[in-house]
Amino acid sequence: MASLSLLSIFGLLPVACLAVVTIQDPSDVIPPSAWAADNAIVPDYNVPFIATQPSPIQAAYTYDSRKKSVSVDHQSYTVNKNDTSVILVTDGAKFDASYIDVLKYGYSSNLLTASFYGFNAAVNVANGSEATLKNVNITVHNGAANIYSYGTGTVVHVDNAWLYSSGPVSHGLYASGNGTIIAHNVQQFSGGMRSSSFSGDSPVGDVYVYNSVAHAAGVGSATFYALGTIYAENVQSISEKGPVVFMDGAQNATLINCDSTAGLLGGVAIFSSQIRTSGASLKLKNSRITTLGKTMPGLWFGNTIINVDIDTTEINTQSGVLVTANYSQITQDFDYYAGYADNNNLLPALVYATVSESKLKGDLVAYNGSYISWKLQDHTSWTGAAYDGASAGKAGTFDVALDSSSNWTLTKDTKVQNFTDGDRTLGNIQSAGFTLYYNASAGQSKWLGGKTVKLNGGGVAKPL
């Protein structure tokens, strides 16, 4: 797509969300078709893992302890060489740059060094250094990150940046090894596979981004790749062949006043790639997530334990599936959700979701013993049902709670374990003739006394 128009793509936003504006991204200036060969490269991660940072990091312009503090402005930098950064800031140096152009050509021969240590990145800030980049234009080809932050104590401040990339592992903002990036007013495009707009990587990378536009076109390229902390405010984005948020393990992602579209896997795809972890969190406030695929859920979780807060937010799907919880993970090729047949060391997903001041439509689906706790509060409206995903193993389970200000419209028969309703009369449930089954023995369902209760719309609530 040439430009991201909120008016034509996303439609009108509610008053609580962003204003309607027309925006553009860097692919309007540099057409991705001109770099189709780069963007078709499939990343090869079947190379030996490197546990420590290789040395030296190759770069055309290096600022280190010998040049402790450097300021530049109105400069142009370019490199046409593999495994070589354009600018390297390292060993505690401080680099301030304004009105600079950076042009990078050259491949990464080892995608693990590119991912975990920033080799071949256009701007690589590493090892306890600090950089401030204002009014910068960075273009990379053949497979290179635009701006990379690596190492404890490394912080990169970005304000008003234009970022374009082609080829694999070409993230826009990329932090790893406990590095941090804080960015305002970014326009970003990446065309390659596994080239997310704003990304953290192992063990932790923290990325904070404000008032920005992002467009990721490649397979497995998310808007936000969370390995650490992702915090976003006023970001408008599309991920053509990836989710809005991709998260592995006990990470944290917060989206405020964001309007984002996903074209593959799910609106969010959150999982643990190995041992199931607890402590992950997802917070959506005054935002909207739209999924384009006919089978894509709004929120997908596998092999993880996570807390989800949804506040004044829309989740729009073509599939009619709002939340999926599964015994599953995502493959290296990002082509499907891998289940028991692929890895029998996984565990069911446990999802604890609280929804406030929102109007949501869609179903909750739990597979293979997974669990969804669904708490509606503060004038929330939900139209949908909860059901097991026709799994061959243990059935999925659900707890549903409504406060007295919230309401639920059933769209099919639904079975829950714990059910609570602040209304106490069930008057805030519209049944449309369907049945709500509850477990009379579950601790938070005992208030119903094991009785069958008539619901508005001709259905009933009755014990399992």
Image (cartoon, helix red, strand yellow):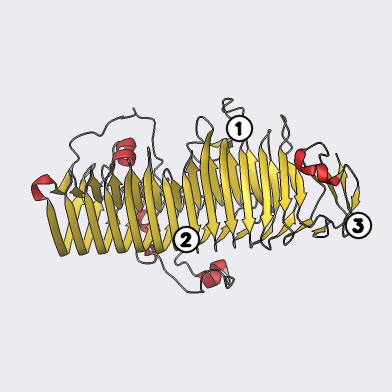
Residue at coordinates 56% horizontally, 52% vertically from top-left? 267
Residue 83, percent from left and from top? 24, 41
Which residue in the protein does label 1 denote?
339
- Foreground residue among 172 and 201: 201
Tell me: 114 left or right of 75.
right
Kind of residue at badge 2: Ser
CA gap between label 1 and label 3 equals 39 Å
Pointers 3 and 2 in contact (C-beta within 8 Å): no
Where is mark 2, residue-wise? 237
Occupied quadrant, residue 156: bottom left
At label 3, counting other C-alpha atoms closer than 10 Å, the crowd grade (few under 14, some 14-19, many 20 or more) is: few
Q: Which of marks 1 and 3 is nearer the N terminus?
A: 1
Q: Is residue 36 visible?
A: no
- The Cα–Cα distance between marks 2 and 1, rounded to whole angstroms, is 30 Å
Label ID, residue 458: 3
Q: Is any part of residue 387 visible from this angle?
A: yes
Q: Is residue 396 left or right of residue 201?
A: right
Q: In this view, does 27 lie above or below 219?
A: below
Above or below, 92 against 394 in this view is below
Give the distance between the C-alpha atoms of the residues marked 3 and 2, in whole angstroms.
43 Å
